[in-house]
Image (tube, rainbow, N blue to C red):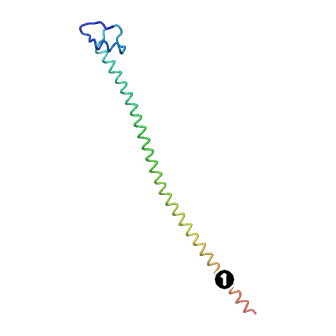
């Protein structure tokens, strides 16, 4: 119990006993308040640290997600450009092959006519 002296505050004495600061001694206001403030500051520091970690993690996650989205959209734009280029090249090659086959067919046809004409001349 707190020793009752004229300078002791009974409320601080009771608070000090409840918090375990005073065991059978007079509760000094300075000691009780100092210990309580240290405890509150420690709790506030822990809460602030946890809040800072949470905020940093959430911000980092959002930034990473935003950057991945940017990269993906840029990649999609490049992908469509590449697809269009390859498609155009394939169409050009296909047209060239068709032209080659048509010209070859016409040349064979002319050669057959020439051979027939030469055969007629020999006879």
64, above or below 39, in the image: below
Q: Which of the pair 18/90 is nearer the observer?
A: 18
Q: Which of the pair 61/115 is nearer the observer?
A: 61
Q: Quadrant of residue 103?
A: bottom right
Across and down, in percent, residue 78 comes to 48, 57
Q: Residue at x 34, y 24 (%)?
A: 41
Across and down, in percent, residue 98 comes to 60, 74
Across and down, in percent, residue 29 comes to 28, 14
Q: Residue at x 52, y 61 (%)?
A: 83
Most extreme residue toward the left is: 6
- Count of marks, rendered view: 1
Q: Where's the C terminus, which quadrant?
A: bottom right
- According to the picture, the residue beneath numbered tag 1 turns out to be 109
Q: Residues within 10 Å of mark 1 (few under 14, many from 20)?
A: few
Q: Quadrant of residue 92?
A: bottom right
Q: Which of the pair 115/95 is nearer the observer?
A: 95
Across and down, in percent, residue 3 comes to 30, 6
Query: What secondary structure is marked by label 1?
Result: helix
Horizontal placement of 46 versus 3: left or right?
right
């Amino acid at each position: 119990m707190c020793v009752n002296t004229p300078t002791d505050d009974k409320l601080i004495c009771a608070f000090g006993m409840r918090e375990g600061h005073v065991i059978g001694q007079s509760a000094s206001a300075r000691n009780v308040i100092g210990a309580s403030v240290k405890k509150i500051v420690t709790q506030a520091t822990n809460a602030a640290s946890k809040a800072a970690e949470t905020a940093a993690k959430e911000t980092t996650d959002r930034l990473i997600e935003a950057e991945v989205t940017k990269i993906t959209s840029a990649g999609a734009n490049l992908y469509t450009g590449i697809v269009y280029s390859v498609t155009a090249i394939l169409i050009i090659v296909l047209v060239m092959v068709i032209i080659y086959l048509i010209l070859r067919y016409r040349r064979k046809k002319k050669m057959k006519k020439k051979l027939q004409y030469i055969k007629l001349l020999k006879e």
